[in-house]
Amino acid sequence: MRKSSSRLLIAAIAAVTVLCAALGTRAYRHTPMSRTNRAAIELVDSLLPMRHTFDARCETESDSLLAACVADTCPSTRYELACRLYRRCHLYSFDRARRAADLMVEAAYRMGTTDAVVEARVCRGYNLARSGFYREALDTLMAVGADTGRVSPRVRADYYIKVGRVCHDLADYTSDSIYTPHYNRLGNSYLRRSLSLTSDPVLRAYVQGKVALKSGRVRVAERYYLEAIALLGDAQGEQAGIMLSTLAHIYRRLGHADKALHYYALAAQNDIRHAFLDAVAMRGLAEIMFYHYSDADRSSRYINIAIADAQRYGTRSRINLMGSLMPVFVGQKMRAEHRMNVFLMSLAATVIVLSLFLAVVMMRYQQRNRQLHASEHALVHANGQLSEANDELTRSNALLNEANKMKNTYLGRFLDEQSALAIELDDFAIVANQKISSGQTEQLRRLIAERVEKHNRKRMLADFDHTFMTLFPSFLTGLNALLLPEHRMSMRDGGELPAQVRIFALIRLGITDNNQIARALGYSYNTVHNYRVRVRNMAFAPADFERNVLSIGL
């Protein structure tokens, strides 16, 4: 039951952990991004803190050109300086560009050149469109009158392209089913007129691509813009920014988010470096990072930058458009943060539950360890007792084996002696009867003396010494090991044991009573007692001497 409960608890914690991980992943779910795009986005992020430097450089250059233009009195030089000022700041500041266009118009009329007048008035009209005054810009451009033969092909081509772009911007601004197609068709008609007036391959590819895009032929537009970008090479500036951001828009319409992000990032880098505030790249980058990559942080940052740029430039229409996107981005970011908070709270709850579970497991583990330790201690104690019992049993078996060995040895010896004695007594009885019958009493006496000499105690002790040393060949060595060096003993001549060694030999055989020892060896009680005390005092450990003697040979 406990195992089942633990498994259920572990399964529940695992499920909560997976759920929390899913919530955390959903809270900040970022679509995988290619390494190239990641590097491009990181480059954009690294350029953003430098925007003030690029802006300051643009302002310094435009201020210098404006001062030179105002100070110069030559109409042609003044017109050239005003043109340079317009090109430098017409995407940075509406007011500066308006001032440059007015200076161009003034200098052009003073010059009296038709191309200069038309070009200056086109720049003034086109500048109105950059700020969102599309109807006013279109009316201004229509009043220029560039369709005369007195205007050069270059200026007319530029006029048609700018009118076409304003028509397309007005179509995007109206964004309905009636006027949008009308303005797109009108814009395309002006753009097509420019094709016969220019031989610039980049400009021709741009115009053809824009006409194809506004006609709904997106794949054709993609081919033209790729061609234009290839012709530009590493060139940067206004043309590169327009090509890159438009190609990004094309890929976004085709559903290629990865390619769209790549070109939006390149366009944003170009815009930042050249201080182009009236550009769509940063807004497009914010939208694709939000809708396709779910990166609410970057989207919010980029759209804020785009709104700030539009406000600084003065583009009313784009401020309104991006202002409508801001609540969507902020709302998504708040929802992501809410999901992250839920994830963190769920994760914290999971950690708390898991910690409690681990604490319970650790307590049970420690309790089990204590029980196992107690069981192990009891087992070790029991093993020790069993080992002692085994040792005691081994010693007992050894003593029994030794006793059996001694018994068998002495029994065999006793039977041999008794058999020999019986044969000898039979022979002696026959000889004695013969001596008595023949009256040889003297010879009988000598024969009896020989038999007594043959079976005296000395011979009996010699037989004991021989038999004992056969049973315990290392007894004397073991006995000497228990004695101090100066009191160690050795065998006598003829292989006899000293009297005190015989006493301890009998003790080794288990005979410890002094009376029994005295009767067996033919010694007096006092002699046996004195020998035992004397030899015991010669030992290293007198108190344990006789117990140690019993262990010799085991």
Image (cartoon, helix red, strand yellow):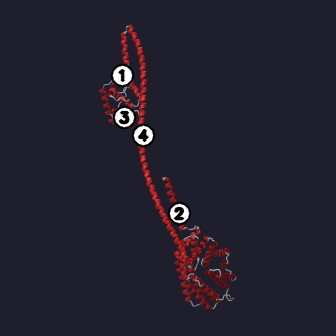
Task: Say whether disc 3 or disc 1 marks the residue closer to the N-terminus.
Answer: 1
Q: Amino acid at mark 3?
A: Asn
Q: Disc number at residue 387?
A: 4
Q: Which of labels 2 and 3 is toward the front? A: 2
Q: Where does residue 439 sit, x and y in percent of width and height?
A: 37, 8
Task: Say whether disc 1 or disc 4 marks the residue closer to the N-terminus.
Answer: 4
Gap in Å between the C-alphas at discs 1 and 2?
Answer: 104 Å
Gap in Å between the C-alphas at discs 2 and 3?
Answer: 78 Å
- Give 469 or 182, whichever is nearer the viewer: 182
Residue extending farthest to the front is 1
Task: Say whether disc 1 or disc 2 marks the residue closer to the N-terminus.
Answer: 2
Secondary structure at numbered mark 3: helix
> From the viewer's perspective, is residue 5 above or below residue 244?
above
Packing grade of label 1 (10 A; few <14, some 14-19, many >=20) is few
- Is the C-beta separation of discs 1 and 4 under 8 Å? no
Q: Is residue 395 visible?
A: yes
Q: Is residue 46 visible?
A: no
The residue that appears at 32% across and 36% down in the rendered structure is: 543
Q: Which of labels 3 and 1 is toward the front? A: 3
Which residue is under mark 1? 458
> From the viewer's perspective, is residue 334 above or below residue 398?
below
Q: Where does residue 475 sit, x and y in percent of width and height?
A: 39, 31
Q: Which of labels 3 and 4 is toward the front? A: 4
Which residue is under mark 2? 19
- Quadrant in the picture for the C terminus: top left
Q: Which of labels 1 and 4 is toward the front? A: 4
Q: Is residue 275 left or right of residue 418?
A: right
Q: Amino acid at mark 1?
A: Lys
Secondary structure at numbered mark 1: helix
